[in-house]
Amino acid sequence: MNNRFRYFFILLVFVAGSSAFGEQVTTESGNPVTTGDPLIPVAELKLRLKPLTQAEVGIEVAGWLKLLQAKVQEISAAEIAVQYRKAELDKADELQQALDAVDKARQAASEQPDDEEAAATLKQAEQTVEETKNAAGEMLRKAAEDKDAAQITAAAEKEIEQQEKTAAETASGDADAGTSAADIRVEDTNADDVDKESAGLETRVQEAADARAESRKNLLKYLTGLREQQTALADRTNLAIDDYERKGGKAEEVDEFRKYVGAVSAIEIDVSDASATWTMVTGWLMSEEGGLRLLKNISVFILIMLVAMFLSRLVSRALKKVMARSRQTSRLLGDFLVVTVRRLVIGIGILIGLAAMEINV
């Protein structure tokens, strides 16, 4: 009787434990459980995905895609803000050129007060200035109405300010890093400034251009960090997609997921904007998820290939000696086996090297 009671108690505990586990999975299945830390180590993410079912991994894929989409939206807003700043700088150059033309026309008209052509040239130059000012004001209003671009610009300036302050504290222990990007208030120079007296207009235009150039520089630096974060999110999203495919996910869904990740991960380079292109390329080369990562992968690939070549020669020599001692194997067959084994070892090294370079084969 005691043995029966003991077996019944053990069975009851087992069933209760299984029910509790099933209830926990059901409770957590509605929300992803691996996206709490977007920078979760890849090795840890693999282990957390391993016990999940296909349906649960599908939820994780949806969660990672949502994080990736949000990051892409942030990058798009930053790129739009960069375009706004470039357009404003171009308009500032046009306004500066128009002001120079007015100065020359005014000087020519003062030297020849009776010259109607000089007077007409001056009038036309002044009209061009007014038109350029109106266009600049319209552009500023358009940029101000874009809330996403304004928010990302403020975030970029805050981030750069914090980086400069941290660098200054590290270098000298002085928390005052001087005049930073956040100290320059771009909003203080608005479209109404161009309607003031023309005496200091050129100075104000130059100050506005300098402020916008600084803001654009901050945005480009901020973009480099955002793209690095996007690369990390894309890696983890692809990892979840791969696990979903291995566990029987629908082929069309897997293809759709991968196409989306590939589409948003592509970086378009505007060759017409030399400074932005240079900043993006140098930032990518120095980023952990960009150039440094590629350099590391290439180094590992070269090392693996060197080891594979060494092992192929070592194994082929050993096999050649064995074939030479064997009287049952012809020389032609022995040479064939030696070459085949050598190429096989090198082929295995290539596969391992490609895997180390994060290339799926």
Image (spheres, rainbow, N blue to C red):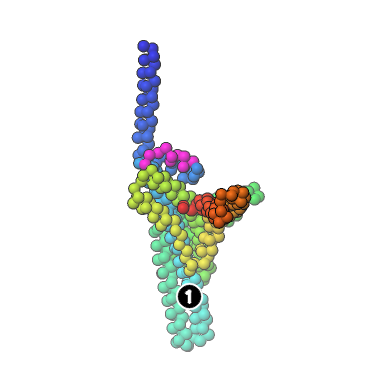
- State the predominant SS element of the stretch in magenta: helix
Q: Is residue 70 visible?
A: no
- Viewer-proximal residue, 94 or 219? 219
Magenta stretch? 44-54
> Quick check: 56 above or below 121?
above
**Label 1: few (<14), some (14–19) or many (≥20) C-alpha neighbours in 10 Å:** many
- Viewer-proximal residue, 250 or 83? 250
- In the image, taking residue 329 as reference, residue 27 lies left or right, namely left
Q: Is mark 1 on a helix, strand or loop?
A: helix
- Viewer-proximal residue, 346 or 195? 346
Q: Is residue 50 magenta?
A: yes
Provide the residue designation for mark 1: 98
- Viewer-proximal residue, 129 or 360? 360
> Quick check: 17 above or below 180?
above
Q: Position of residue 133 (x, y in %)?
A: 43, 70
Q: Is residue 117 visible?
A: yes
Which residue is at 35% across, 28% downward?
19
Residue 333 placement: quadrant: bottom right
Which residue is at 55% across, 56% downward?
332
The residue positioned farthest toward the top in the image shown: 1
Q: In which quarter of the image is the N terminus?
A: top left
Tell me the kind of residue under disc 1. Answer: Ala
Q: Where is residue 171 in the image (x, y as percent from the top left)?
A: 64, 50
- In the image, taking residue 322 as reference, residue 245 lies left or right, namely left
The residue positioned farthest toward the front in the image shown: 327
Which residue is at 47% across, 56% downward?
153
Which residue is at 37% across, 41% downward?
54
Q: Does the magenta stretch include residue 314?
A: no
